[in-house]
Image (cartoon, rainbow, N blue to C red):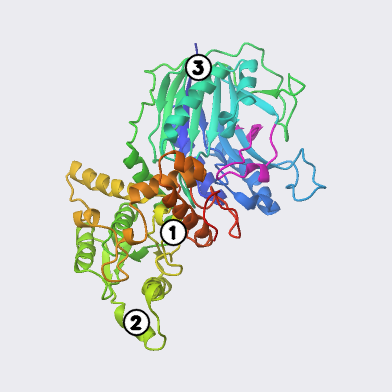
Amino acid sequence: MPTLRIALAQVNPTVGDLSGNSGIVRSTTRAAVDAGARLVVFPEMMLTGYPVEDLVFRQSFLAASRAAVERLAADLDSDGLGDTPVAVGYLDADGPPAVNAATDPSAGPRNALAVLHRGRVAARYFKHHLPNYGVFDEDRYFVPGDTLVVVRIEGIDVGLTICEDMWQTGGPFVAARRAGVSLVLTVNGSPFELHKDDTRLALVRRRAAEAGATVAYLNMVGGQDELVFDGDSMICTAAGEVLARAPQMAEHLLVHDLDLPLGLLPPPPSEPPAAGPVRGEMGGDEMGIQRVHLSDPRPALDETPVQGGQAPRLADEAEVWQALVLGLRDYVRKNGFGKVAFGLSGGIDSSVVAAIAVDALGPADVIAVSMPSHNSSAHSREDAAEMAKRTGLELRVHEIQPMVDSFLATMSLSGLALENLQARVRGVILMSISNQEGPLVLTTGNKSELAVGYSTLYGDSVGGFNPLKDVPKTLVWKLARWRNDEALRIGEEPPIPENSIAKLPSAELRPGQLDTDSLPDYAELDAILLSYVDGDKGRADLVAAGHDPELVDRILRMVDLAEYKRRQSAPGTKISIKAFGRDRRLPITNRWREPAQPDV
């Protein structure tokens, strides 16, 4: 059986950076070829970054992407790399976007995969299954392909697929079995969520068995707005054996030797690559099969087989922590910010954000601002100072009471209005620092608070990014404990003061205030929110699960009424199956309430 040395390039592209992403392809291909690779594979939409969203509707962007893939093929050839096939995702189009009824529904923008060889685009595959759920809107943007492309590389038949093609039954993997391929490439832009790595592995095994072929699954890595792509690329045989697996949350070049059978059919005649979908051997409702011959078998590799290895899996808290760090780092760096600033109260949420920011950017680029009032406890001030001492971040102190008193001298406020005034003064301070010096302001509210509206608009909710937006309060505590334990494990000082973790949470906007004055215990609250928000369960389901009916009615009412606040909240890293924002989209003006819930 011949050996094909494959390189899966788990890299971090940036949306819209066609030249920068092309540069990543060129430099990584050079490294792969130097390692002896005879096929190099890059992620879904590598050249454009992913997801490109409404950039699809710009003809200039479509044209630039098509030109970029042609130019990249020529550049790889001029680099002396043209003899090595390179599979790279990009945005293609064989017609204008579908913006009205007059548009041809069979043509338009395509989520595409090109195989570059000897200075040209030798093959193009268009994604067949288009996801239209959760964070995905691909049916809005793309036209599906209907032809599986099989590329013969060194006599081995390789099928091309893209992301959702693997997540749905039927289609390309069934066609791959019909075509008798030995290897299926599936290139991905698959966003992270907790436990998704386990789901992926089971799915890769299932599709490999379905195709009767080895599957090389490649995922990108890095942050893009709310999304984090976690890598976790792998190679799996039709029998379910994992041959190699890349690390999570890190760039990596996975090089592995595959022993694969040669294709049985004679090679097709040489022909230029198709510009659009091509009907091949099959007709009717089945996918067509287009075959492209690139190279005949070469002599076997005369050296010790290269093994890609299997990176260890991350524990849950480690996985989430690294996702939050990667999401924040890429949001800051890719958007051109130098530093971040946020309010550091000494409480658990802001302390965890501080630790994430230091891990992501380094202490020199982190500005924490302590903004005490006469309601702030001494331990809050002390805990903020201790956090700064342990991590080395810059701590500034701005007393807000004089500013609050100045406002109260001209306007009489009390109760909730006075509490919110304190939060808004703090927001003004943070945004003033941002306007004056340029750091990105981080907000520190967690998912539990956002769910029930336990925040002040234009106060503690102010900021351009929220690392904890999709992190429930109970998980915030777990992450804090994990991060401190991890520091001890590697011989460092725990970054988060124990008192910040152990003390009862409070906004400290009035004397003696605790979160439990307004909210139930967070363990019970998060259990209800997990079912209602993430699981779309109704009131009856929650009551049947054992939750107190009056509490359920109260919490559901708070969640429903807070939609207008969430619509104005900063983006934040997605870690769950249903994050606020792109995942969960509900109308603000909405009179539907779960049955038996009190009228409002």
Q: Looking at the image, is mark 1 or mark 2 nearer the viewer?
A: 2
> Quadrant where the C terminus lies?
bottom right
Q: Within the magenta stretch, is there residue 125?
A: yes
Q: Secondary structure at mark 2?
A: helix
Region rendered in magenta: 116-145
Distance from Cα at disc 3 to Cα at disc 2: 68 Å
Q: In terms of image quadrants, where is residue 331? A: bottom left
Q: In the displayed structure, does residue 215 sit left or right of residue 516?
A: right
Amino acid found under the numbered disc labelled 3: Ala
**Looking at the picture, how far across and down is residue 46, in whole percent?**
54, 42
Q: Mark 3 vs mark 2: which is more N-terminal?
A: 3
Q: Mark 1 vs mark 2: which is more N-terminal?
A: 2
Name the residue tied to disc 2. Answer: 403
Which one is nearer the viewer's eye here, 425 or 523?
A: 523
Name the residue tied to disc 1. Answer: 465
The label number, if any, that marks residue 238 in the structure image: 3
**Looking at the picture, how far across and down is residue 308, in whole percent?**
39, 26
Q: Residues within 10 Å of mark 1 (few under 14, many from 20)?
A: many
Distance from Cα at disc 3 to Cα at disc 1: 43 Å
**Looking at the picture, how far across and down is residue 286, in whole percent?**
71, 22
Q: Is residue 577 visible?
A: no
Q: Secondary structure at mark 1?
A: loop
Q: In terms of image quadrants, where is residue 527? A: top left
The residue lying at 42 percent from left, 54 percent from top is: 469
Amino acid found under the numbered disc labelled 1: Phe
